[in-house]
Amino acid sequence: MLQADSSDAVVAASADTVEEADFDSTKAGYSAVEAMGTRAIGETNITSIFWAQKGLLTHGTGAWVFGFPNATVRADSQVSVSLTERDNNGTPFLGLATTQVLNVVPHADGTISVRYHVGWSSNIRVLFNFIIVN
């Protein structure tokens, strides 16, 4: 179960946006040694790779500040975020709503700001999938 991360904060979202309390957020983290086998180039300066997911109930254009207590996030971290709908069982699917990640900003305090758009008139379950590389 998702523990409430005190580092998560609303920046600007629809007034009824809420983080899903029953969402299992952290999926995997890899050390630099483990990451070595995942690259396609001969050399790398990768020191860590972290993967996690967060779920929101939201709609419209908003921004959310996500915190990952078990990840190293710096202002110069490389962060990739995808966004999709989830069904009532938590399974991602291609639904009728459009979902877009508009901006992603890693911060020196260990948080990541994400501006997004969910094209639906009321709250729906969405999944943010994060890959953080240092």
Image (cartoon, rainbow, N blue to C red):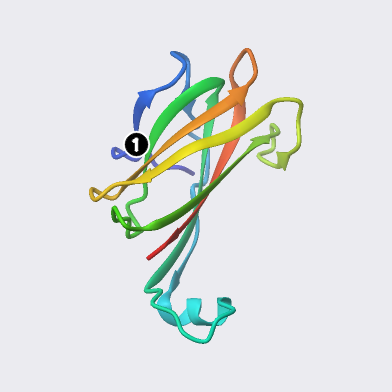
* Camera-side residue of 32 and 20: 32
* Residue lying at 61% horizontally and 29% vertically, measured from the top left: 125
What is the x, y in percent for residue 44?
44, 80
Q: In this view, does 38 lie above or below 18?
A: below
Judging from the image, what secondary structure is the residue with disc 1 in? Answer: loop
* Residue lying at 23% horizontally and 48% vertically, measured from the top left: 109
Q: Is residue 122 above or below residue 33?
A: above
* Residue lying at 32% horizontally and 57% vertically, measured from the top left: 76
- Looking at the image, residue 120 sits to the left or right of residue 27; the answer is right
Mark 1 burial class by Cα count in 10 Å: few <14, some 14-19, many 20+: some
- Looking at the image, residue 125 sits to the left or right of residue 26; the answer is right
What is the x, y in percent for residue 22?
52, 36
What is the x, y in percent for residue 77?
36, 58
- Identified by mark 1, the residue type is Asp
- Looking at the image, residue 131 sits to the left or right of residue 5; the answer is right
- Looking at the image, residue 117 sits to the left or right of residue 78; the answer is right
Q: Is residue 112 above or below residue 58?
A: below
Q: Mark 1 points at which residue?
A: 8
